[in-house]
Image (cartoon, grey):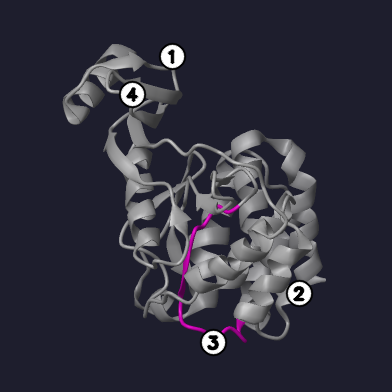
Amino acid sequence: MSNTVRQQIEDILHEKLIVFPVYSGKVKTESGKSYFLKTGSKSRMYCCEVHGLEELEKSFAINIVRPVACGDNFILTEFVKQGRIQNNFFENFGQKLAQLHQFKSTEFGFYEDNFIGANEQMNFANDDEKSNWSSFYFNKRLLYQYKLAERNGFVNDELKRDFAKLEDRIDRILGIVNEKPSLLHGDLWNGNFLCNTKGEVVLIDPAVYYGHREAELAMTKLFGGFSPDFYEAYQKEYPLQEGWEYREDIYKLYHVMNHLNLFGRSYLSETEWIVRKYVN
C-alpha cells in the first residue's frame, strides 16, 4: 500500500519524495517542501476530512490545516511547524472559536455523512431534523450510537429503559435552543489543535457539521486541556444561552458513547451515569 500511496503523491506533487513515513507522518520532497501524511485502510474518511477542512475554511475565522490531496486510503495536508504555546494562546483560541460559531447555516447537519474517529457520523437530516435541533441531536447523534452499542453488546435492560425515557425528555432538555445552526469542528479535543510558530491555533482532524455550539464546548471539557482563559474569551465574544451548564453532559454523552463503541466497556459506566442524570 505504501508504494502505491507514495506514487500517487509523487504524481500529485510532480516531484520525488525523499522522506516518506511507514504509515503516517512527515513527507519531504526533493525540493525541500514538507507535508503531513495520514494513511490507512480504504475509507471515505480521508476525503470527508478534506471536505470538513474546506468547510471550516469558508468561515475565515480560525486557522485550519490546509489540505493538499486525498485518496481512498490517505490524506495529505500542509506540514504545520509547531511553536510554543504563549500566555495569550487560549484567550485568542476562545475568541476565534466563538467567531467560527457565528458562521451559520439555515439547517442542521451537513451535505454528507462523515466520521467521528473511525465510526460514521450521520449528518443527512430529514425535514424535521433540519430545523429541530433536539430531533437532529437525538436521532443522528445519540440514537445512532445507542443502536451501535446494542449491536456491540453493551446495552443492558436498565440502560435500555433509561434511554427510552431520555427520548421522551429530549425536547424538554434541549427545547430552549433557538439559535441558528453554527459551523462546528465536531471533534474538538486537545489532540485536534496545534500551535504554529506564530503562537496561533491551527485546527486539524475535523468531524464537521452544523449544530448547536454548546455541543462543541462540551467536547472540549471531556478530556480537558483548555484553560479558563479559553472559556472566558469565548463567553465574552459570543455568550452562551442560559442553562448551558445543565445541557453540557447531554452533549458529552454523544462522544462518551462513541468512545464506548470504539474502545469498549471502560466508557459504559459514564454512559449509564449521564443517561440516568437526565431521566431521574
SS at circle 3: loop
Per the model, the C-alpha gap separating discs 1 and 3 is 48 Å
Q: How far is the residue under mark 1 from the one under mark 2?
A: 44 Å
Q: Secondary structure at mark 2?
A: helix
Q: Earlier in the sequence, mark 3 or mark 2?
A: 3
Amino acid type indicated by mark 3: Asn
The residue indicated by pointer 1 is 22
Q: Which residue is denoted by mark 2 in the rendering?
A: 245
- Relative to 179, residue 137 above or below: above
Q: Is residue 183 magenta?
A: yes
Q: CA distance from mark 3 to mark 2?
A: 16 Å
Q: Quadrant of the C terminus?
A: bottom right
Mark 3 touches mark 4? (CB < 8 Å)? no
Residue where numbered disc 3 is placed: 178
On whether residue 1 falls in the magenta region, the answer is no
Q: Nearer the viewer, mark 4 or mark 2?
A: 4
Residue type highlighted by circle 2: Glu
Residue drawn at x 38%, y 52% is 53
Which residue is labeled 4 in the image? 32
Report the side of 237 relative to 182 (left or right): right
| Tag 1 near tag 2, CB within 8 Å | no
**Which of the 4 image quadrants contains residue 263?**
top right
Categorize mark 4 by other alpha carbons within 10 Å: few (<14), some (14-19), many (20+): few
Decide which of tag 4 and tag 1 comes sooner along the chain: 1
- Label 1 or label 3, whichever lies nearer to me, is 1
Q: Bounds of the magenta span?
A: 175-188
Amino acid type assigned to the residue bearing label 4 in the image: Gly
